[in-house]
Amino acid sequence: MAEGEEIYTEIVQSSLPVGRVKRIMKLDKEINKINSEALFVITNATELFVKFLAEKSSEVAIEKKRKTIKLEHLRIAVKRHQPTADFLLDSLPMPPPAQISAKTDRSRKISDNDSVPVGTRRIDSFFQKGP
Amino acid sequence: MQRGGGFHGYHRLPIHPTSGLQQTDMKLKLPEMMNTNNPSTDDNECTVREQDRFMPIANVIRIMRKILPPHAKISDDAKETIQECVSEYISFVTGEANDRCQREQRKTITAEDVLWAMSKLGFDDYIEPLTVYLHRYREFDGGERGSIRGEPLVKRATDPGPYGMTSFVPAFHMGHHHNGFFGPASIGGFLKDPSTAGPSGPTAVAGFEPYAQCKE
C-alpha cells in the first residue's frame, strides 16, 4: 500500500437496510420517535448480533463435526451466552417432540445410575446426534 | 412454513390479507414489551407483511458469510430462525431504550438510550465498537450520506486536515480477516489505545485509528 493511495470510505454503512430496521422498531406501538443516530446505532448493533450468532453457531457446528449449521447448533450457541439466552431462548422453535421424549427416556436411565434426582435430564441429552 | 408456537409475535403467516388467520394460528405469545392486550393490535400484527417484520434474508446471509468458514452451509430453518432472532433483538433493545426514554419523559429515542439499553441487557461488548461508529457517523454522515463512499482520501497523506489521521478501514470489513470477531483480542486489536490516538502529525497509519475522531 503506497502512502496516500488508499481509498477508504469514511462513513460506516451497515449491510442492513435502515428503513426495515425502523419498520421493525415501529411494530411496537409504544415507540414514538427515533432519531437518526439511534437508528444508526441499532442497525449496526443488529449487524454485530448477526455476526455473533453466525460465529457462535459455526463453532457449535464445528464441534459436532458438521459443515451445515443447523437450528440445534444455533440453539446451543444461544444458550451459551446468557444475555442472548435470556431474551431469545424461548423464541426459538421447539425441537421436534419425538426426539425430546426419546432422549428423556435415555437420560433417565443414565441418571438412575448417577446420584441425581430421577427425571433429571442430562445436558448432553440435548447434544445427541439427531437423524 | 408453520412453526411451533414459541416465537413472540413474529410467527410466519402464509401470505394472507385477512385477519381471520389469527385464530387458526398456533399458540402465539406476544412479548410483554409490545403491551398488546387489545385485539385491534393483533389485527395490525397480521396485516403487517412478513417482509416488514424481518430483515431481508439475503442481507442477513451476506453478513453471516463474512464470518463463516468458506464452505460452511446453513440449513434453511437456521436461516429463517436467525432472521427472526434479528427482529427479536431489535425489538428487545428498542423496547428497553424506549423505557428509559419514557422514564426521562422524552419522546425521541437517542443513541445514548440505545447504548444504555445494550449495556443493561448485557451486550457490553458492542458498546465500544458502536461508540466508535457513532463518532464517525457524527463526523461524516451529517450531510454526506451515501455520496462520499469511494472518494479517495489521497490528500490526507500530506494534509491531515482537522482530523490528524490518514487512513482507516471501515469497521465492518474486519469480518473478512478473522473468525474470532468477538474475541476480546479482536476488539482490542481494532481499537487502538485511545491515549495514543488523536490529532497528530501527518503520519501514515496502516492500521485503525478510530479514536482519532473522538473529541472527548
Image (spheres, rainbow, N blue to C red):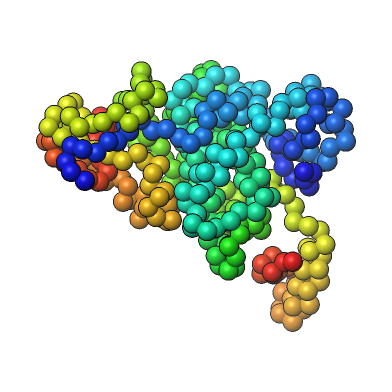
Q: Is residue B138 visible to the viewer in this orientation of the structure? A: no
Q: State the residue at coordinates (55%, 50%).
A: A53
Residue B166 or B107: which is nearer the viewer? B166
Task: Give the quarter of the image for residue B98.
Answer: top right
Q: Residue B176 appears at what percent x and percent y?
A: 40, 50
Q: State the residue at coordinates (74%, 38%).
A: B11
Q: State the residue at coordinates (46%, 22%).
A: A36
Q: Is residue A84 visible to the viewer in this orientation of the structure? A: yes
Task: Give the quarter of the image for residue B44.
Answer: top right
Residue A4 or B143: which is nearer the viewer? A4
Q: Residue B88 appears at what percent x and percent y?
A: 62, 39
Residue A62 or A56: which is nearer the viewer? A62
Q: Is residue B37 left or right of residue B163?
A: right
Q: Is residue A37 left or right of residue A84?
A: left
Question: The C terminus of chain A appears in which quarter of the rendering?
Answer: bottom right
Q: Residue A93 appears at what percent x and percent y?
A: 72, 49
Residue B142 or A80: which is nearer the viewer? B142
In the image, residue A33 above or below residue B27: above
In the image, residue B46 above or below residue B10: above
